Image (cartoon, rainbow, N blue to C red):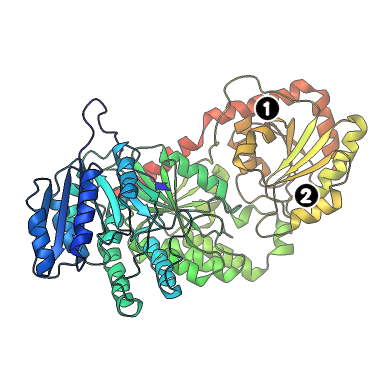
Amino acid sequence: MSFKSTQPTVPFDSASSQPTRSVVVPVYAESPSMVVSLVNDLHAAGWQEVVVCADRPDSDLRETLDALATDADTLVSVSETRRGKGGALIDGLDRADADIVGYVDADGAIPVGELDRIYDVVADGDASVAVGSRDVEGDCRVSQTPIRQCLARGYRSLARRVTHAPIEDFQCGAKAFRAEVWEQVSRQMRETGFAFDTELVARVHRRGYEVEEVPIAWDDPGDSSVSPTRDAPDMLRSLYRIRKSVRGPAPEAPGSADDDATKVALVTSHPPNRGHLAEYGEELARAYGQRDDVDVTVLARRSDSAPPVEFRRGYEVRRVWDRDSLDGARALLDELVAGDYDAVQFNIHMTYFGNENVHRFIGLVLPPLLSRVYGMTVLTTMHDLLEVVEEDMVDENIGLVEQAGARAATQLLLMGDASTVTSEEYLDIVTDRYYSPNVHHVPHGTFAYADGGLPHIPEPFRIMVFGHLSPTKDIETVVEAFEQVRMSVPDAELVVAGDSHPGFPDHRETLEAKYGDRPGVEFLGYVEDDEMDDVWGNASAVVMPYRTCTGVSGVFQLAKTYGTAVVSSDVDGMRTSTVETGGDAAFYESGDPTALADTLINLWVDRERLQEIARANADAAAAYTIGDTAERMVELIDREVSA
C-alpha cells in the first residue's frame, strides 16, 4: 500500500555505487546478548553504519556498548536519563550519515531480512519512505491478548483520522527513508515517546513524500512495555498534540512544484457514492489535479466501500461526513475549520446534505457560516434552482413551507464570498430574485471531447436512457414509444443504463420488474467508468425523458463528450439544460409516447439529421471542457483569496 507524493521520488543514481545504509537501534532494558546479535546481523547483511542509542544502561549493557563502540562502523550514544524511544531515535537519526537512514526495534521481533526488504523499497526509488506493517497482509497479532488487539485497532483508527495518512500500521518499529526526508522533518519532531512513529508518518505525509507500506513477518516478543490501562490516556494526549502541531500551515518543501499552489477544499459527492453530483465532482477534481496552481482535497461522504483517505491522480479524497446526520455536518465543519485550506468550494444542489429538510438546511448553512463567522474564502457552485422546476411539479410535490425554505437556503448560499451557476438563465434568475452581489456564470463543461472525426451512428437502432432513475424521468413514456418504434424498426433496441436515484431507492428494480421482459428492452444498472465508452459508443441516440429539470444536464454533457444525438422532452428548463449550453437536440412533447416515437423514427429514417445532431454535440464538446470550467473556478477563487 502506498500513498501519493507531491514531491518526486527519484531513484538513486544506478551508475554510482549502491546507496549507503544506516540504521538506528533504540535500546532500553534489552539484554546485552540481544543487542550484540542484532548489531552483528545488521553489519553482516550490508548495513554500513549501525547507531545504537541506549537509555540508562546497567553495568553489563554499558560494558557491551563500550565494546561495540570500538568498531568504526558502529556509533554508540548513551544517555543517563530516560529519553524515550522517540528521543533516542531523534539523537540517532541526527548522527546517522548515509543515503538511506531508518531504525528497527532492538527486541528481535523484526528479522533483519524483513528490514532489508523495507530499505530496498527506498533504494529502488519506489518511495521516499518505507514503513513496515504487521497489518497489511495476514494477521501477525494473533498472539496478542484481545485487549491489546483492540487497543491497536482503536489507535490505528484514531491515528488515521488525525494524520490523514492512509496506512494500516503506524507503530511498527521498522522504517526507512532517504536522508533528505529526515533533514526536512527532524527539526519539527516533538514526540519523544511511543508516538514518535505516528508523528513521523504524519509529518512526511504532510510534506507530500511518497510512503509505501511493506508487509513484514513479525514475531511478537510478548513482553511489551506498553500498558493498555496506563498508557492509553498518554496515547490520546499524544494524538491531540500531533493533530495540533501537524495540522497547522504546511511547511514549504524546497523544490516542491506546488509551493505557491492555492489549497482548496472541494466539498462534493464523489465515487464510490453515486448521484448528488458524484461524477461531476470527480471530473472537476481531476481537472484541478492536472493543474500546478491548485492543490485540491475532496471532502466527500463516508463510504463502506472506500477508505477514509484515498489518493487519486493529482488529488486527495478525505471521506469525513454523512448525509442526514447532524454529527456528519459537524464533522465536515470541524475538518474545514481545522484544515489548512486557502479556500473552500461547495459543489452542491439543494438536496445534497440529506433527504430530510432539516439536514438539507443545516448543510446549506455551512457556506455562509464559514464565510461570515470563520472568515474563510468560500465559493459555492449551485447546480439547481427551485425557480426552474415545472410549476405543476412544485404545486404537487413541494409545499409552501418547503418552497420558502428552499428560497431561504438559496439566499444563504449566495452569502458566501462568490457563487457560480451553470447557465446564463440561472444567472438571470438569481440576480433578479435574490440579493446576489457576486454570482457568476461558469458553464458545466464536458468531461472529454471527441477527436474531431465524424460521429459513428451504430446499427441496429439502439436507443438509450442514461442516468439515475427516479419518477422525474419518464421511463413509462419511453417504453410505450419504443414499442411503437419497433413496429417500424423491428430490430430496434432500448437500453436503460443507470441505477436508482439515491432519493428513490429500488426505483430501477420496480421498472425492471415491470418492463425488463419486453422484447428489445435491457436494463444495465449502474455503469462503471471503464464501461462508459462501450455503452455510449453503441448508442445511436440518447433520450432525455425528464418531466422536470432543475439544473444543467450532466447526461447532455456526456452526449456531447461522446458525440451522441439527443432526443429530449420539451419542458421548462430542458432547453436551458441542453442546447443553450452548446450542441443540439430534437425535442418532443413531454408525456406523449406517439410524439416521441415519431421523432425517433423520423431521425432513423433521416440519418443525415441524426448525424447533424451528433456532429453538433461533438463540436460543442471541444468548445468548453471541464478543464475550462476549472480554469474559471481557479480565477474566481484566487481573486477572492487575494481580496
Which residue is depicted at the point 20% across and 61% down?
33
Q: Position of residue 580 (x, y in %)?
A: 61, 37
Residue at the spot 58% in from the left edge and 52% down from the top edge: 384
**What residue is drawn where x is 64% and y is 37%?**
532
Q: Nearer the viewer, residue 454 or 78?
A: 78
Task: Calculate the distance from the C-alpha at mark 2 to the C-alpha at mark 1.
Answer: 23 Å
Residue 155: name its quadrant.
Answer: bottom left
The answer to whether mark 2 and mark 1 are in CB contact below 8 A is no
Residue at which label 2 appears: 474
Task: Name the foreground residue: 134 vs 192.
Answer: 134
504 left or right of 233?
right
Q: Position of residue 608 (x, y in %)?
A: 75, 20
Viewer-proximal residue, 110 or 313? 110
Task: Name which of mark 2 and mark 1 comes first in the sequence.
Answer: 2
Left or right: 331 with respect to 339? right
Q: Which mark is residue 614?
A: 1
Query: Label 2: few (<14), some or many (≥20) within 10 Å?
Result: some
Residue flagged by tag 2: what amino acid is it? Asp
- Return the mark for residue 416: none
Residue beneath the point at 21% across and 64% down: 85
- Residue with the most extreme right position: 487
Report helix, strand or loop for mark 2.
loop
Q: Is residue 211 above or below residue 486?
A: below
Residue 454 x/y as whole percent: 65, 19
